[in-house]
Image: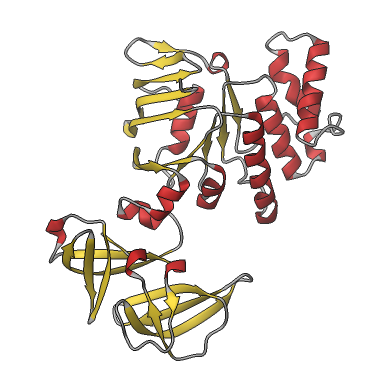
Amino acid sequence: MADLAVDNLRIRLGGNEILKGVSLTLRRGEVAALLGPSGSGKTTLLRAVAGLEQPYTGTITVGGTTVFDGAAGINQPTEARGLGFVFQSYALWPHRTVAENVAYSLKIRGVAADVQRDTVQKSLDSLGLGKLGHRFPHELSGGQQQRVAIARALVYGPTVVLLDEPLSNLDAKLREEARAFLKELIERENLAALMVTHDQSEALAIANRILLLNGGVVEQAGTPQDMYNAPETLFVAEFMGSNNHIEGKIMGMSDGRASIRIGDFLLDGQARCAPEKVGQAGSAVIRLEGVHVADGSNGGQNHVKLDLVTSMFLGHTWEHLFRGPGMTIRTHHDGPLSSGAHWLHLPADRVWIF
């Protein structure tokens, strides 16, 4: 049985349809990441599960209990849904100590004071905050405040924890460390977690499953590997990863392969388009890491000679920008390159043609 089940959820806000029939399931030990551009509906979906937005149709079930059913008129309040919620801003009370912040959800549930103290201390100890219970939020670092917010969300053992951009307020270095900490915590506590993020690297690293929303519908859902390596639509291919997008005319299609003409260059790749697209405008997408510098090539299949425009040192690699008639290509390479023209190889199995 799913710990969280959302079925055909629809929401209107200000006369606009924000969610247009979204469904998902989530079990303990799973992290589902809601990913998508601004306005796609991911935060609205999270708030609807929490009871902070009211759909007009669909159902939401938490731990086997229906907390919302538009047809039956069921709409349980937030505090009755058995959820933990980590807000983007952490939402810690500045006038309460760390221990008081964490204990609040136990206090409003009438838990005895001595049980509160023991439970809060165990929660703080598990998150490396055991000696900070007497401090106030302003006396903590951003990473420590984030862990206090997580402790408060988990202290009473919720069925599902909701995470709204949990790492977005941290600087880049701390965010990488917190990402590993959060994934380890979710696995250790065997949580069912639904996370909203705008950071695809965060979703790829933490989630077992990604739901990519676009205009209020799920464009594609799958494992991080599926979403990255097997995009079903042009939107998914371009949203995930760092890409080269090339416009041209689709010339042919056969056995799951397609070819697209860009000026005088014919590029072969995996067909992601319908047969009726042959003869029409199309798009080719290839990730930066899919392009190889192949100096010395004599112009074999999917090899093109382009001029080096500029180079950028990124620390762990170099990024090079090439340009020629009808195309601009970026790629990663393990070192600097000389100025002038270079042969690039765009392997057919790394090119998607839409």
Query: Residue 82, position in %: x, y?
Result: 57, 17
Tell which residue pokes out farthest to the front in this image.
255
What count of labels does the image hold? 0
* Above or below for 224 versus 45: below
Which residue is more in the foreground, 275 or 171? 275
Q: Residue at x 79, y 39 (%)?
A: 138
Q: Residue at x 34, y 53 (%)?
A: 235
* Above or below for 174 versus 189: below
Which residue is more in the foreground, 157 or 345? 345
* Above or below for 43 versus 254: above
Q: Is residue 282 visible?
A: yes
323 horizontally vs 271: left or right: right
Q: Residue at x 53, y 85 (%)?
A: 337
Q: Quadrant of residue 215?
A: top left
Q: Residue at x 44, y 86 (%)?
A: 295
Query: Residue 91, position in %: x, y?
Result: 66, 32
Query: Residue 98, position in %: x, y?
Result: 79, 29
Query: Residue 68, position in %: x, y?
Result: 42, 16
Quarter in which the C terminus is drawn: bottom left
Colour mode of the rendering: secondary structure
Which residue is more in the foreground, 59 or 226? 226
Quarter in which the N terminus is drawn: top left
234 horizontally vs 88: left or right: left
168 horizontally vs 21: left or right: right
Q: Quadrant of residue 105?
A: top right
